[in-house]
Amino acid sequence: ACQKAVTPPRRPSHPVITRPNTRAVSKRNVFRTAVVVRSMSSMSSTPLTGDACTAYDALTTRLRKLADLDAVEATLQWDELVMMPDGAAEARGRQKAALAELKHREATSVMHGDAIALAEAMKSGEGCAFRAANIRDARRDYDDAIKVPAELKAKEAALGAKGYSAWNKARDNDDFASFAPVLTELVELRKEFATVCAVDGQSVYDYQIDQFERGMTTERLEEIFGSLREKLAPVIKDILAAGELTQHKVFTDKSLQAFPEHAQERFCRAIAVKMGFSFEFGRFDTSVHPFTGGSGPFDVRITTRYDADNFMDATMGVFHEVGHALYEQGLNRDQDGLPVQRALSMGVHESQSLFWERYVGQSLEFWEANLGLFHESFPVTKTENVTAEDVFRFVNKAKAGLIRVDADELTYSMHVVLRFELEKALFDGSLKVDDLPEAWNEKMHELLGVTPDSDKTGVLQDVHWSDGSFGYFPSYTLGAMYAVQFYETCRAEIGHTKFDETIKGGDFSVAKKWLNQKVHETGSVFVSADALCEAVTGTKLDPNVYVSFLETKYRRIYGLA
């Protein structure tokens, strides 16, 4: 699963994995425009004329200017993580601060607000779902930007830096108590933001969730994650009790040195090309933490890292990041620089990475198709007679562990359920920050049967809370659930046998084209991920699809079918 490599701003900017189109659409704003999209078939467009056209053109000119500023910021962030020399940190800080000031001034100007109001008054959104969504989201972004007092933004910036430093030191020293006071401040800060920015009827924690998963609520998450607790947890218990899978020695005997880093890079680049990543409009580099960045479909940049002792890290990481990148490269180019071109939510973005990582990259058909490339890239695997089935078993092993980012497909969701339940308790007042370590350890034992022996491997393992990114974690598992629902629908529409044969034959273009048309090109035209899911699959997110897929797959792999 993705690590949180770059801190996502809460007011979305240009499309990159860390910048989804997030704030929820309030009831009053949904009906400001004439088009509310409920299905793929409702996205036809009627041309604009007269004053409505003039007003819309004036607004989109402003929106594209803001998007260009976001693109500059995205390029600076990529450079900072990949290329920038250490000595440039202070100068880069000044550059980013100057850019942030310019962006805020443009995004909150009276003229920008007037342009939005005129497009609304002229009903420029009527007759086109994309125009309607652009005006809807421009209004939402503007209203959010002008709500936040300058002193609160300054407090957020200062506390974010303080929080990261405190977390980093506490984690190194295994000392949660030293981080607790800053974490308490961060919780209170997010409550202040909710007081200022939350729409009518939105709870404090609903507001936090909505920053990353637009339209999602605590109540809906309790329904979804409650189903995982009830139905998936027993499956996990059964699978883990079956014992570990026997693995080929090439994956366990480090002395064979089967996966040198240079060979991994060659293999990963070849896989990226096969998946359809465009190097004309993209880059592939290395960084400490893998991430996907850039500034839209014309400039998408992915990174990974290599470890000679961990073949899975780079290979599955590339599937994951290329999945994100294909979403970005597939966004609607006709809407370039406009709000509707942005990704719908973190969960939807994660669904695109996990579609490729889990349902293609971890499939037997993929490894049957690419066994020759695998042997060519890693000659020791050919000498040792490694089969596609051997690789399949290795990439699908399951084991209860303490660390979320190292968790496998089967157990990962329980790590997210734990974090959701703790965050909810923090914001409803039923859990104090000082009591987090004990609550964390109890839930880890309850959900996965393991207990951390230190806070470093427990409550301090993730960076997210250090800058106040509460509500982020649910998107990871929501993404996995959206992905499997998209996957099942894709196979059904293409034909189960045909889909499997195309993957086994090494042709990933059929799946990519389906995702382009159904998910990527729609951007954020829908008001929520549930609405998109219903338009694509016929139903909103259904946890039973996810549970059924995992149970069937892992019972077969572990001989329990």
Image: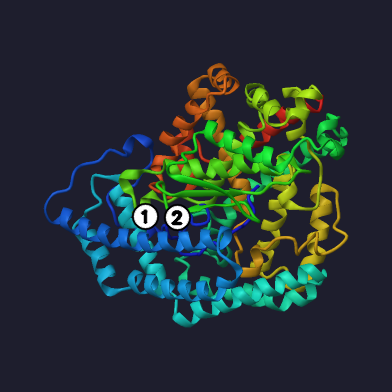
The percent position of residue 75, horizontal first and vertical second, equals: 46, 59
Q: Nearer the viewer, residue 556 or 507?
A: 507
Q: Mark 2 Cα within 10 Å, few/some/many (few <14, many 20+)?
A: many
Residue 312, horizontal then vertical, whole percent: 72, 40
Is residue 188 visible in the rendered structure shown here?
no
Badge 2 is on which residue? Answer: 21
Look at 53% across and 64% down and name the residue there: 207
CA gap between label 1 and label 2 equals: 8 Å
Seen in the image, is 28 located left or right of residue 192?
Answer: left
Residue density around tag 1, few if under 14, some if 14–19, many if 20 or more, within 10 Å: many
The answer to whether 344 is drawn above or below residue 500 in the figure is below
Say which quarter of the image contains residue 437.
bottom right
Find residue 334 and report its horizontal and vertical position in percent: 30, 44
Q: Is residue 225 found left or right of 453 in the rendered image? A: left
**Mark 1 and mark 2 residues within 8 Å of each other at the beta carbon:** yes
Residue 26 in the figure: left or right of residue 348 = left
Q: Which residue is mark 1?
A: 339
Q: Is label 1 in a helix, a strand or a loop?
A: helix
Q: Earlier in the sequence, mark 1 or mark 2?
A: 2
Label 1 amino acid?
Answer: Pro
Image height check: is 137 above or below 321?
below
